[in-house]
Amino acid sequence: MSYKGMTFEEAEKDYNEYKQNPNDYALNKGQAYYESLGYKSLMEGVLGEADKQGTGDETRARIEAFKKTSQIKAFGFIGVTFGSFFGLKLYSESDPDGFARNFPFFM
């Protein structure tokens, strides 16, 4: 039994890799595809193929927008997390007994 040049065991292994982590599977397959076309990385391949199709500027703009929003989200999350811990620290120092009553799992 052979499909796309794979034996049954190879296909089963490939499917199990997909089931374990679909995101990594897709990234690895994309990386392998663009390396087979001669590109060094997935991103270089995506941009190279977009340039061939004439949509390179659009693709670059979408990638930059995605990176910018991702960084804003990351810094926001980090800020909220540190702010929360700093607030808990201030609360625990200002009223240790109240802190122990309200947050027993920290003690």
Image (cartoon, rainbow, N blue to C red):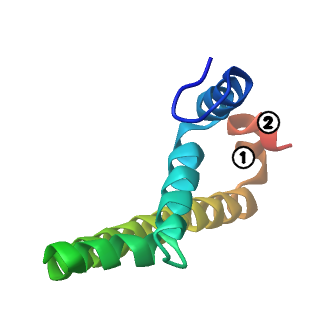
Residue 99 circle label: 1
Rendered residue at 58%/35% (across/down): 5
Residue nearest the viewer, comparing 76 with 33? 33
Lateral position of residue 102 relative to residue 62, left or right: right
SS at mark 1 in the image? helix
User: Is residue 44 placed above or below 106 in the rendered structure?
Assistant: below
Lateral position of residue 97 relative to residue 30, left or right: right
SS at mark 2 in the image? helix
User: Is residue 90 placed above or below 57 in the rendered structure?
Assistant: above
Dot 1 crowding, Cα within 10 Å, few <14, some 14–19, many 20+: some
* Residue found farthest to the right: 107
User: Is residue 3 placed above or below 84 in the rendered structure?
Assistant: above
Lateral position of residue 57 relative to residue 26, left or right: left
Task: Where is residue 73? Give x, y as percent.
Answer: 40, 64
User: Is residue 102 placed above or below 91 in the rendered structure?
Assistant: above
Residue nearest the viewer, comparing 58 with 4? 4
Asked if residue 61 shows in the view, the reply is no
Quadrant location of the C terminus in the rendered image: top right
Residue nearest the viewer, comparing 48 with 89? 48
Residue 55 circle label: none
> In the rendered image, which residue does mark 2 sit on?
105
Give the Cα separation between the discs numbered 1 and 2.
Answer: 10 Å
Rendered residue at 58%/44% (across/down): 25
Task: Check disc 1 and give the amino acid type.
Answer: Phe
| Sequence-earlier tag: 1 or 2 | 1
Task: Check disc 2 and give the amino acid type.
Answer: Phe
Specify the quadrant of the image occupied by residue 55: bottom left
Task: Where is residue 15? Give x, y as percent.
Answer: 61, 27
Quadrant location of the N terminus in the rendered image: top right
Task: Where is residue 84? Give x, y as percent.
Answer: 57, 59
